[in-house]
Image: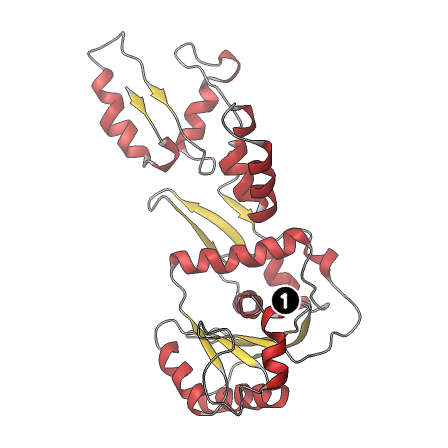
Amino acid sequence: AVCDERGQWKGSAWFRGVSPSFAARPQARAGLIGTPRGKNWFHRLWLKGQGGQERDYAAFHWKSSDSPYVSKEFLDEQFRSIPRETFLQEYEADPLDNAMAVFRDVRSLVKMLRAENDAMTVIGIDLARKLDFSAMIGMNSSRQVTFIDRFQDEWAEQKRKIVSKAFQLNARCVVDATGSGDVIVEDLRNSGIQVEGFILSNQTKVNLIQNLQVAFQQGTISIPNDPTLIAELEAYELEYDDDTRKYKYSAPSGLHDDLVIALALALWGQRGALAYAAIKTQTSYMRGGRSSYMSSNR
């Protein structure tokens, strides 16, 4: 039996499905092939073949660089473009821990000097869910965090704070529009500020967080010495779920991630900012209604 992409299989598919069929076939063999998805059941079987631990198992490990069909230029580009953990997993077959820190060396990107807002400042906003906090983080076109605000208020007061800050800075907002957030986004737009809604699904959250992760990895972002933000970033983790066979970005149980999401949304709003700087300096989108300077018709 040749079983490919084993890291993405549920353990029960092997232990209850394929493996029992070998019971009456003592000469049968199985080849299990795949990229590791954390230290799951596939990794544990692989360990049995290491160093001749078990007579019936043999284990092999190859990196993408060992293949004659993969160029060094391609691997170099992937290393620069995706999070380090993803590269290690996909191209070096490194079975990373099931739960691992997403952002590393966070404190090395702390800047003690105050960052100033500029004409391209974007405000990332994570709206409260149940007992969570709402959070606002501003980021200028140099990807420097300019302010942090975190609060628990009634919606009317939250709206007042968001609208006031957006008008004060003439800034565009990128707001979590998941669930009831879509209605809130429209309410903010009706207040006259520029708003881009971002709906968080499994895939869009991966894109959002990995965009922030790459910025930390490449050192293209700076944050203030804010203890709450630093604590959230250092605790934020990537966990592989054996049941769903998917990775999940989240704060550990009992902790918050509102500042992490607000920071990620602010950075997301800075995509293409420099290319549109001239447009915004000529015409304020606050006076022109709701069309975004990031929209395709620009």
Quadrant where the N terminus sits is top left
Residue at point 22% right, 15% down? 23
Q: Residue 151, image x and y in percent?
A: 55, 80
Question: Does residue 251 appear in the picture of this structure?
Answer: no
Residue visible at 34% across and 28% down? 4
Image-based side of 122 in relation to 206, left or right: right
> Please, what is the three-letter code of the amino acid marked with disc 1?
Leu
- Give 34 or 150, whichever is nearer the viewer: 34
Q: Position of residue 255 (x, y in %)?
A: 52, 63
Number of numbered discs: 1
Whether residue 1 is visible: yes
**Most extreme residue toward the right, as rendered?**
113
Q: Quadrant of residue 11?
A: top left
Instruction: Determine the residue positioned at 40% across, 56% down.
Output: 203
Q: Is 88 rendered above or below residue 153?
A: above
Image position of 76 with respect to 181: above or below: above
User: For the residue carrying disc 1, how many other residues have a C-alpha within 10 Å: few (<14), some (14-19), or many (20+)?
Assistant: some
Determine which residue is flagged by label 1: 229
List x then y, in percent, for residue 189: 44, 87
Q: Element under label 1?
A: helix
Q: Is residue 95 left or right of residue 217?
A: left
Q: Observer-nearest residue: 115 or 103?
A: 115
Quarter occupied by residue 212? bottom right
Q: Is residue 55 above or below residue 248?
A: above
Please report the residue visible at 71 percent of the width from the left and 69 percent of the height from the top. 224
The picture places residue 62, in percent across and down from the top left corner, at 51, 24
The colour mode here is secondary structure
